[in-house]
Image (cartoon, coloured by chain):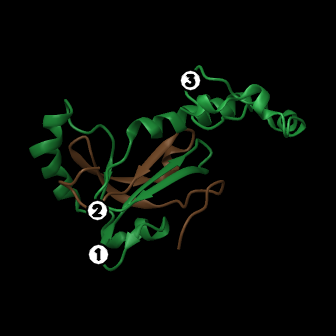
Amino acid sequence: MDSNFSHKVWQEVELSRMVKGGIPFPMIADAGGKIGSMYGVYDEEGGVDVRGRFLIDPAGVLQAMEVLTPPVGRNVLEVLRQLKAYQHHQKTGELMPSGWQPGKPTLPPGTQALARAGHVWEIWKVENAF
Amino acid sequence: MGVMVGKKAPDFTAKAFHKGAEKEIKLSDFNGKWVMLCFYPADFTCV
């Protein structure tokens, strides 16, 4: 939302003291909430973009999103987990069950998974979600 | 307006602050890479 001048001041005054060299990625100035409106996260009443997070794959397809109201911050580890899960899926076709983490079991690709309907319990346990 | 998972993310062009300077950013410039697009209400708030 804020201007690039504001981004610059934030970077210099605070962020560069949290992260060596400052934040390495581009900070967009979303003037008037134009981009926020396109993504459905612009709050016209408050005049701000709420905490929306969008994971976009190399083909430009939106794969995952999360939107929070302002008081609560995001979980970076969850975003990274989703990124690794989508990357694994796109590479192997395997399905990524609830709570998947690198090294945990996956489910076989599409058609085989259908054949297994009603039999997932044999290969995936509830404990795997945690 | 909104967006939908499994569909193309809407492309946009905007001015951004990056590595000490202002530059123009286009979402489609990042084709071929994973992108995390984050919105937040204001600078000097938690993210």
* Rendered-image quadrant of the N terminus of chain A: bottom left
From this viewpoint, which residue is outermost toward the top? A103
Instruction: Indicate the chain coloured brown by its letter.
Output: B
**In the image, residue A129 lies at what x, y percent?**
58, 34
Residue at (52% x, 59% y) in the render: B11
Residue B39 placement, left or right of A99: left
What amino acid is found at the position of numbered circle 2 in the picture? Pro
Mark 1 crowd level (few <14, some 14–19, many ≥20, 10 Å Cα): few
Q: CA distance from mark 1 to mark 2?
A: 9 Å
Q: State whether discs 1 and 2 lie on one chain.
A: no
Q: CA distance from mark 2 to mark 3?
A: 33 Å
**Viewer-nearest residue: B41 or B27:** B41
Label 1 close to label 3 by CB (< 8 Å): no
Q: Which residue is mark 1?
A: A46
Q: Which residue is mark 3?
A: A102
**In the image, residue A113 lies at what x, y percent?**
83, 36
Instruction: Indicate the chain coloured green by its letter.
Output: A
**In the image, residue A8 lies at what x, y percent?**
17, 50
Q: CA distance from mark 1 to mark 3?
A: 40 Å
